[in-house]
C-alpha cells in the first residue's frame, strides 16, 4: 500500500496538509458484508469521524439499485443478484474490477452531490489519461465511457450528508457476465476494460493512480489504515 500513499503525497508535494482520509485495501471480498459494513460506518460516524476510502475486489455478483427493475436482469444464472440501497439500475462486480467506496462527509468538504459525482468521474478520466486513454462523460448516464463503451460505473448513496457505495472500474476482467444484464438499465450498452483499451492488466498498477486522482479532486491527504475483518 505504500505505493498508493506515495502517489498521493506526490500529488500534493509540499503544500499544507489537507483533510485526512484513511485508506483501507480490503482485498477480495463477497459483496454483502462490505455493503453492511459501509452502512454501519455511515450510521455510526460523527462530525469528527475521519473520512475513509475502501478499495475492494468483489466475488461475482449483480447488484440492483433502489430504482432498479428486475427486467434488466436477463439471465443471472449462477451469479447472485442483490437488491441494494444505492442509486442506479443493475451492474456487475467481479474479479479484475477495482471497486472504490468513498466514505466522505460532503458537508465538511463543502461539496454538493452533483459536484461529488463530477469529481469522481474526473478522477477516473484523469486516471485513464495516465495511459493515454481518453475517457468521457455521457449526459444523463453517470460513469465514464471510452468511445461509447462504459469502463466505470457509478452508484452512490448519501445519508445525512455522508456518502457510501461508489465506483466500479473495469481493469482486466471477464466481461461476459454483462451480457446477462442490461448494464445500468441500457439495452445493448457496450462495456470495456482498461486492459482492452491498451492499459495495464494489473490492478496494483491502477490503484495508486486512482487514489491519488481522487485525493486531488477532494483535497484529501490519504493515510494507510488496517483492513477490516468480515
Image (tube, rainbow, N blue to C red):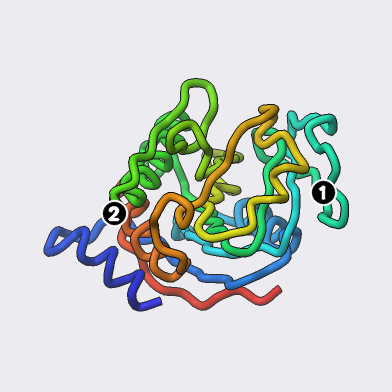
Give whichever of 86, 121 is nearer the camera.
121
Is residue 21 among what the camera can see?
Answer: yes
Percent across and percent down for residue 48 are 45, 56
Q: Residue at x 41, y 73 (%)?
A: 224
Residue 147 position, x and y percent, is: 43, 34
Name the residue beneath numbered marker 1.
81
When asked about the image quadrant of residue 36, the answer is: bottom right
Decide: few, some or many residues near mark 2? Use Cα within 10 Å; few <14, some 14-19, many ≥20.
few
Q: How many labels, in total?
A: 2
Determine whether, in the image, residue 64 is placed left or right of residue 119: right
- Left or right position of 132 against 66: left
Q: In this rendering, does residue 103 appear at all? A: no
Name the mark nearer the viewer: 2 or 1: 2
The quarter of the image holding the N terminus is bottom left
**Quadrant of the frame with the C terminus:** bottom right
Q: Foreground residue, 34 or 3? A: 3
Q: In the drawing, what numbered circle is on residue 130?
A: 2
Q: Which residue is drawn at the image coordinates 71% and 38% (left, top)?
A: 90
Upstream in the sequence, badge 2 or badge 1? Answer: 1
**Local SS, label 1:** strand
Q: Residue at x 66, y 76 (%)?
A: 229
| Residue 174 x, y percent position in the rendering | 64, 57
Q: Count neighbours of disc 1 (C-alpha within 10 A) and say few if under 14, some if 14 to 19, many if 20 or more.
A: some
- Asked where in the image residue 95 lies, by quadrant, the reply is bottom right
Instruction: Find numbered disc 2 in the image and state the secondary structure of the residue it sits on.
Output: loop
Amino acid at each position: 500500500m505504500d505505493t498508493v500513499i506515495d502517489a498521493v503525497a506526490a500529488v500534493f508535494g509540499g503544500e499544507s496538509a489537507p483533510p485526512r482520509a484513511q485508506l483501507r485495501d480490503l482485498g477480495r471480498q463477497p459483496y454483502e458484508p462490505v455493503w453492511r459494513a459501509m452502512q454501519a460506518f455511515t450510521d455510526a460516524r460523527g462530525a469528527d469521524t475521519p473520512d475513509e476510502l475502501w478499495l475492494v475486489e468483489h466475488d461475482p455478483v449483480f447488484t440492483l439499485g433502489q430504482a432498479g427493475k428486475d427486467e434488466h436482469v436477463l439471465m443471472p444464472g449462477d451469479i447472485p443478484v442483490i437488491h441494494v440501497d444505492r442509486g442506479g439500475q443493475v451492474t456487475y462486480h467481479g474479479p479484475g474490477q477495482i471497486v472504490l467506496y468513498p466514505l466522505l462527509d460532503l458537508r465538511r468538504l463543502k461539496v454538493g452531490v452533483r459536484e461529488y459525482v463530477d469529481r469522481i468521474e474526473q478522477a477516473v478520466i484523469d486516471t485513464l489519461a495516465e495511459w493515454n486513454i481518453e475517457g468521457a462523460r455521457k449526459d444523463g448516464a453517470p460513469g465514464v465511457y471510452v468511445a461509447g463503451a462504459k469502463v466505470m460505473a457509478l452508484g452512490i448513496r448519501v445519508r445525512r450528508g455522508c456518502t457510501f457505495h461508489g465506483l466500479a472500474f473495469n481493469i482486466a476482467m471477464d466481461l461476459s457476465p454483462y451480457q446477462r444484464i442490461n448494464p445500468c438499465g441500457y439495452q445493448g450498452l457496450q462495456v470495456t476494460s482498461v486492459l482492452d483499451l491498451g492499459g495495464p492488466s494489473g490492478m496494483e498498477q491502477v490503484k495508486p493512480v486512482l487514489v491519488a486522482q481522487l485525493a486531488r479532486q477532494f483535497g484529501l491527504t490519504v493515510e494507510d489504515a488496517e483492513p477490516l475483518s468480515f
